Amino acid sequence: MKSVFSVIHRPIITEKGLDQKEDNGTLCFEVNVHANKREVKEAVEKLFKVKVASVNTSSFYGKLRRRGRYSGYKADWKKAYVRLKPGEKMIEYAENV
Protein backbone atom coordinates (compact mmCIF):
# COMPACT_ATOMS: atom_id res chain seq x y z
CA MET A 1 0.00 0.00 0.00
CA LYS A 2 1.09 3.54 -0.70
CA SER A 3 1.75 6.09 2.03
CA VAL A 4 -1.30 7.98 3.30
CA PHE A 5 0.19 11.30 2.25
CA SER A 6 1.08 10.06 -1.22
CA VAL A 7 -2.59 9.14 -1.78
CA ILE A 8 -4.33 12.23 -0.31
CA HIS A 9 -2.89 15.54 -1.45
CA ARG A 10 -5.24 18.14 0.08
CA PRO A 11 -8.88 18.84 0.95
CA ILE A 12 -10.84 20.77 -1.66
CA ILE A 13 -12.45 23.77 0.01
CA THR A 14 -15.09 25.17 -2.37
CA GLU A 15 -18.74 26.11 -1.98
CA LYS A 16 -19.85 22.83 -3.54
CA GLY A 17 -17.48 20.83 -1.36
CA LEU A 18 -18.62 22.54 1.84
CA ASP A 19 -22.30 22.08 0.89
CA GLN A 20 -21.68 18.35 0.32
CA LYS A 21 -19.96 18.18 3.70
CA GLU A 22 -22.84 19.83 5.56
CA ASP A 23 -25.77 18.20 3.74
CA ASN A 24 -24.56 14.68 2.94
CA GLY A 25 -21.64 13.99 5.28
CA THR A 26 -19.34 13.80 2.25
CA LEU A 27 -15.74 15.02 2.22
CA CYS A 28 -13.90 16.18 -0.90
CA PHE A 29 -10.16 15.61 -1.47
CA GLU A 30 -7.64 15.98 -4.25
CA VAL A 31 -5.96 12.59 -4.54
CA ASN A 32 -3.16 10.93 -6.50
CA VAL A 33 -4.08 10.36 -10.16
CA HIS A 34 -3.09 6.68 -9.90
CA ALA A 35 -4.89 5.98 -6.59
CA ASN A 36 -7.94 3.73 -6.72
CA LYS A 37 -11.05 3.85 -4.52
CA ARG A 38 -9.78 1.20 -2.10
CA GLU A 39 -6.52 3.10 -1.48
CA VAL A 40 -8.42 6.35 -0.91
CA LYS A 41 -10.77 4.64 1.56
CA GLU A 42 -7.91 3.06 3.52
CA ALA A 43 -5.96 6.35 3.60
CA VAL A 44 -8.91 8.38 4.93
CA GLU A 45 -9.75 5.76 7.56
CA LYS A 46 -6.14 5.57 8.70
CA LEU A 47 -5.47 9.33 8.66
CA PHE A 48 -8.69 10.59 10.29
CA LYS A 49 -9.72 7.45 12.26
CA VAL A 50 -13.27 7.33 10.84
CA LYS A 51 -15.32 4.69 8.99
CA VAL A 52 -15.96 5.31 5.29
CA ALA A 53 -19.22 4.23 3.63
CA SER A 54 -18.34 4.93 -0.02
CA VAL A 55 -15.85 6.65 -2.31
CA ASN A 56 -16.60 8.26 -5.69
CA THR A 57 -13.79 9.55 -7.88
CA SER A 58 -13.62 11.89 -10.83
CA SER A 59 -10.61 12.48 -13.12
CA PHE A 60 -9.80 15.81 -14.77
CA TYR A 61 -7.44 16.40 -17.67
CA GLY A 62 -5.08 19.38 -17.65
CA LYS A 63 -6.09 22.40 -19.71
CA LEU A 64 -3.95 24.24 -22.23
CA ARG A 65 -2.56 27.46 -20.72
CA ARG A 66 -0.66 30.19 -22.50
CA ARG A 67 1.83 32.77 -21.24
CA GLY A 68 2.53 35.06 -24.18
CA ARG A 69 3.94 32.96 -26.99
CA TYR A 70 4.63 29.97 -24.74
CA SER A 71 2.00 27.33 -24.13
CA GLY A 72 1.76 24.26 -21.96
CA TYR A 73 -0.68 22.03 -20.17
CA LYS A 74 -1.66 22.07 -16.51
CA ALA A 75 -1.27 18.75 -14.69
CA ASP A 76 -4.01 16.10 -14.72
CA TRP A 77 -5.67 15.60 -11.34
CA LYS A 78 -8.26 13.47 -9.55
CA LYS A 79 -11.00 14.36 -7.06
CA ALA A 80 -12.49 11.96 -4.52
CA TYR A 81 -15.83 12.34 -2.73
CA VAL A 82 -15.66 10.33 0.50
CA ARG A 83 -18.95 9.61 2.31
CA LEU A 84 -18.69 8.75 5.99
CA LYS A 85 -20.87 6.14 7.68
CA PRO A 86 -23.84 7.46 9.71
CA GLY A 87 -22.88 8.39 13.27
CA GLU A 88 -19.24 9.19 12.43
CA LYS A 89 -17.82 12.48 13.68
CA MET A 90 -17.37 14.97 10.81
CA ILE A 91 -13.78 16.03 10.11
CA GLU A 92 -13.26 19.79 10.51
CA TYR A 93 -10.77 21.11 7.97
CA ALA A 94 -12.66 24.31 7.08
CA GLU A 95 -15.27 26.38 8.86
CA ASN A 96 -18.31 27.34 6.81
CA VAL A 97 -18.53 31.10 6.62
Image (cartoon, helix red, strand yellow):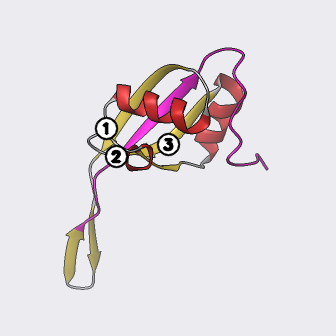
Q: Which residue is mark 3?
A: 29
Residue 32: mark in rendering: 2
Amino acid type shown at disc 2: Asn
Determine contact: label 3, label 1, CB under 8 Å: no
Determine contact: label 1, label 2, CB under 8 Å: yes
Is disc 3 surrounded by few (<14), some (14 to 19) or many (20+) residues within 10 Å?
A: many
Residue drawn at (76%, 46%) of the image: 96
Is residue 30 shown in magenta? no
Is residue 81 shown in magenta? yes
In the image: residue 40, left or right of residue 95: left
Residue 35: mark in rendering: 1
Residue drawn at (41%, 33%) of the image: 40
Amino acid type shown at disc 3: Phe
Which stretch did the figure color magenta? 73-97
Q: Secondary structure at mark 3?
A: strand
Residue projecting furthest to the bottom: 68
In the image: residue 25, left or right of residue 97: left
